[in-house]
Image: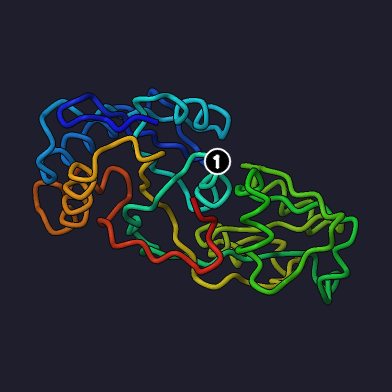
Amino acid sequence: MGTLLAGALATLVFCAPGYPGTPADAQPLLDQFASAALAVSGWPAGSLAVLYDPTEEGGLAKLGRTDAVLAFVPYPFFVEHAAQLHLVALVQADVADLGPEQRWTLVAGSGRIPGPASMAGYTLLSVAGYAPTFVRRFALGDWALPADVRIESTGQVLSALRRVAAGEPVAILLDQTEAAALKSLAFASALKVVTQSPELPVAIVAVVDSRVTAARTQALKAGLLRMGRVAASADALAALRLRGFVPPRLPSRAAAP
């Protein structure tokens, strides 16, 4: 794939499968973010376009375009598609109320899953269910799922938790924000935390297939790392629930480009 020349229009693709949000709602916030990122990186004004897609399929299609030089994606998406898209992590998002990393939590019906083998024949639901490699290799720590466990994507977390509490052969993998709400549920006593992941990145900004020059890449990286310390960037970050960015700290088992 050819490298984008300095001054050419580049596109940053935001893709967040399973999380709420529409392109119409997101676009003004993303445009504000792009302007702030350009200001701190020294890229030419107007040289960075931003697109949002709430689906895995749509995000992959947009990232397949030759002008798509950057991806801003949840870590499960990065793990699942880093090899396919030749993604190289540039920075890691520092998310408000979470920080740069989070733990994922596997929840099942109370007393129903004493060990991994007990999940044979189960369905595992998660907002990250579109990324089975992430689920099996990262999100469960050393908990080895039986081969016949079906992994499915869902954004309907409360409905899934009700199924778990009702005794269906279903477990759910929750991100840290979702897991923090468990105790507030009226049926919390019917649920049990089975295992947790180590701390994992929340989201990654990555270069796609070396489509941007090394000089522009390094300028953008330096600018993004400064954003959290630049007052003029505060509103753009806060609108996306970000505090800033940090250098990437990827687990050793991360999918390699």
Q: Residue 186 location, x and y as percent?
A: 68, 61
- The number of callouts visible is 1
- Quadrant in the picture for residue 215: top left
| Residue drawn at x 28%, y 62% as measured from the top left | 246
Q: Residue 198 location, x and y as percent?
A: 54, 73
Work out whether 194 lies above or below 204.
below
Q: Quadrant of the N terminus?
A: top left
> Which element type, helix, strand or loop, lies under badge 1?
helix
- Quadrant in the picture for residue 47: top left
Work out whether 45 lies above or below 170.
above
| Residue drawn at x 71%, y 46% as measured from the top left | 159
In the image: residue 221, left or right of residue 164: left
Tag 1 residue: 84
In the image: residue 184, left or right of residue 160: left
The colour scheme of the drawn protein is: rainbow
In the image: residue 52, left or right of residue 150: left
Of 193 and 129, the residue lying toward us: 129
| Residue drawn at x 54%, y 46% as measured from the top left | 83
Of 131 and 170, the residue lying toward us: 131
Q: Residue 248 location, x and y as percent?
A: 36, 61
Specify few, some or many for label 1: CA neighbours under 10 Å numbering under 14, 14-19, or 20 or more: few
| Residue drawn at x 36%, y 48% as measured from the top left | 205
Work out whether 140 lies above or below 56.
below
Kindly identify the amino acid type of the residue bearing the numbered disc 1: Gln
- Quadrant in the picture for residue 100: bottom left
Of 49 and 219, the residue lying toward us: 219
Q: Residue furthest front?
A: 2
Q: Residue 98 location, x and y as percent?
A: 40, 63
